[in-house]
């Protein structure tokens, strides 16, 4: 059973860089999946942040692309997210996800497993 | 960017009744659409992918239909555990977008 567990600082000051880690268990990497991050502001809907393939190629939401980087460390079974210059608008629940890849286009398709999420508050 | 519009925003249904949720896309996404269920404080759970294929372990009372720009999620007979928020998500290209969600509440 694939399990994902996010971890993070909980509270981040405005203008600083948010760093999150997702640890994966129950899965052997290099089987052709993407890994991604999704976030949810309090009381609002879901927003895709970005996805990284097991080869390292990435796709990012254009609205966040200038501030976001996603890393994959298969030896540690971890996916990391860095979001720079955070503001109050970045407050929310951050989920990591395993993402099925399209066998024809190679694009990320949908998430079949999600972690329970980690709450991030941006405040001074 | 493909904009997904879900309707209604809130659906009030009695247990045992049928619920029909809609998702409209601003341009064709073929059948590259998924549906998720989210309960308060929980992660989104995949219900449907490819517009109509149920994910592993999803009960048969959940069904998806549609293609192009109009999609529907139907819950044939609502159970107590089905009251939640439902999101559609398109993956016609690498740029994912989600609908704003439909809340299914007890009538």
Image: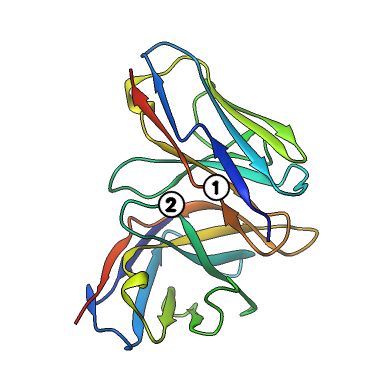
Q: Which residue: 32% across, 88% down?
A: A16
Extreme residue in the left direction: A124
Q: Residue at x 39, y 22 (%)?
A: B12
The percent position of residue A104, horizontal first and vertical second, equals 80, 59
**Where A77 falls versus A103 (above or below)?**
below
Q: Are marks 2 and 1 in contact (CB under 8 Å)?
A: yes
Q: Nearer the viewer, residue A52 or B56?
A: A52
Find residue A95 and report its horizontal and vertical position in percent: 39, 61
Residue pictured at 47% horizontal, 60% vertical: A97
- Frontmost residue, B59 versus A27: B59
Compared to residue B100, the image places residue A38 above or below, namely below
Q: Element at badge 1?
A: loop
Percent coordinates x, y for residue A78 in the rendering: 42, 75
Q: Which mark is residue A112?
A: none
Q: Which residue is mark 1?
A: B99
Q: CA distance from mark 2 to mark 1?
A: 8 Å
Colour mode of the rendering: rainbow
Circle 2 chain: A
- The foreground one among A73 and B9 is B9
The quadrant the C terminus of chain A occupies is: bottom left
Pointer 2 residue: A45
Label 1 environment density (alpha carbons within 10 Å; few <14, some 14–19, many ≥20): many
């Amino acid at each position: 059973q694939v399990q994902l567990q996010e971890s993070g600082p909980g509270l981040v000051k405005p203008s600083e860089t948010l760093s999150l880690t997702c640890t994966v268990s129950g899965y052997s990497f290099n089987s052709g999946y993407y890994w991604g991050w999704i976030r949810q502001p309090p009381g609002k809907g879901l927003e895709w942040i970005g996805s990284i393939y097991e080869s390292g190629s990435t796709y990012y939401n254009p609205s966040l692309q200038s501030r976001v980087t996603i890393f994959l460390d298969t030896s540690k079974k971890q996916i990391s997210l860095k979001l720079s210059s955070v503001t109050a608008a970045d407050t929310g629940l951050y989920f990591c996800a395993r993402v099925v890849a399209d066998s024809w286009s190679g694009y990320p398709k949908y998430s079949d497993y999600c972690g329970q999420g980690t709450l991030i508050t941006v405040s001074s | 960017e493909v904009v997904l519009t879900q309707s209604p925003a809130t659906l009030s249904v009695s247990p045992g009744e049928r619920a029909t949720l809609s998702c409209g896309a601003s341009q064709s996404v073929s059948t590259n659409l998924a549906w998720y269920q989210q309960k308060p404080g929980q992660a989104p759970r995949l219900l449907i992918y490819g517009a109509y294929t149920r994910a592993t372990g999803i009960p048969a009372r959940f069904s998806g239909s549609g293609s192009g720009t109009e999609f529907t999620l139907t819950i044939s007979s609502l159970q107590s555990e089905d009251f939640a928020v439902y999101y559609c998500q398109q993956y016609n290209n690498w740029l994912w977008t989600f609908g704003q969600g439909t809340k299914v509440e007890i009538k």
